Amino acid sequence: MVLRFAVFWLAGIGLRVTILAVPPLLPLIHRDLALDEKAVGALSGIPVLLLGLAALGGALIVSRLGPRRAIVVGLVTIATAGALRGIGPSIAMLFAMTFVMSAGVAIMQPALPSLVARWAPNATGFATAVYVNGLLVGETLGAGATLPVLLPFARGSWQISLALWSVPVIGTAALAALVARHAPVAVEGNERRWWPDWRDPRIWQLGLLQGGVSALYFGTNAFIPDYLHAIGQNALVAPALTATNAAQIPSSLALIAVAQRLAGRKTPLLLCVAAALCGFPLLLAGSPLAVLIGSTMIGLFGAGILTLALALPPLLAERDDVHRVAAGMFTVGYTFSFVVPIAGGVLWDATHVPATAFFPVIAGALAVAAGALVIRVER
């Protein structure tokens, strides 16, 4: 059982570490490849879009191979494509491999809730909090360790830095392939169904909630680096990204103990949204202390929203239907949140006011509140 929870935690790291290694390196990538702000927004938005569109393919793979083998396929795809993003370097290779890597992450998204329902049917909240904690650790490592640790080790090469993050991901794939390796491959009955029931209102409600928190998180991480460069606070880039991501860890650790009791309740979600929104005036104030406090608040309370949102599919759906409900949620949610970084980049380019890039991000947080108000959970 310990190894199974280790797979949950390490797979969570693999979901985000290669994606979140990009924002700290954006100024270097921006310089070498001459990207404009719309291209920066698209580079940040491609993973988000693929997490939505390819989630349906992930549900199909789960229905044919089972969730554990789907996770192995996803991790191998992430590691391989993530390492190839810097080949050239060329814009075409960067975007193409980001596309493939994101598809690997999308395969894992419906597989993990389905594996939670299989391996921990009586502790879905706890198991979800474990893999979400791993996800947040992966975000923290990608955002916080890339500049001070990997970039010097890679002798200043952003290409090598991206490739190095693939090493722990392929190691996780090997561990997942070994754990419960004698389980049957065949999937039978209802579990072979994979297409979501789009008439189910829960899918749209979950999609609104999950899309809002994704917009909040990815949009904030996408524009913090260039925003701080634009206002002359270059030295705050690494500390602000680290604060946004590292603040999620204590929040997720606390939720490991209480997620089972809080999952499905509206009040915790609404309180987290309100607290996260309070971080934006501080982030945009520009002074070092205010920026760090605002970044910390967004990360701290955004993690609470994420954990409670991802606990819902295995809590709401029958075990054989978790992958379908999760795939529908991710398709709706990530498609919605895809437009946020692009909209932020368009606003910035149109107004030449850096702070406007965060306006769509704030709208995403308000969407979380809307989703929390309309969803109905029978716990």
Image: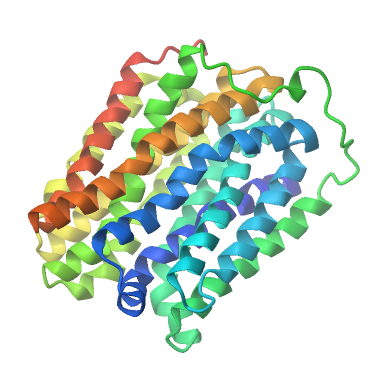
What x and y, as percent, mark residue 43? 39, 58
Task: Looking at the picture, tell me which residue is in the foreground, 212 or 294.
Answer: 212
Quarter occupied by the N terminus: top right
In the image, farthest residue toward the bottom: 155
354 up-or-down from 203: above or below = below
Q: Residue at x 40, y 44 (%)?
A: 251
Q: Residue at x 44, y 60 (%)?
A: 20
Task: Looking at the picture, tell me which residue is in the foreground, 208 or 42.
Answer: 42
What x and y, as percent, mark residue 55? 57, 37
Q: Is residue 368 left or right of residue 346?
A: right
Residue 39, quarter of picture:
bottom left
Q: Residue at x 38, y 50 (%)?
A: 45
What x and y, as percent, mark residue 29? 36, 74
Residue 325, quarter of picture:
top right
Q: Is residue 355 visible?
A: yes
Task: Looking at the picture, tell me which residue is in the foreground, 212 or 372.
Answer: 212
Q: Is residue 154 left or right of residue 11?
A: left
Tally of numbered discs? 0
The colour scheme used here is rainbow
Q: Residue at x 57, y 21 (%)?
A: 315
302 up-or-down from 269: above or below = below
Residue 169, quarter of picture:
bottom right
Q: Is residue 1 visible?
A: no
What x and y, as percent, mark residue 135? 51, 50
290 up-or-down from 302: above or below = below
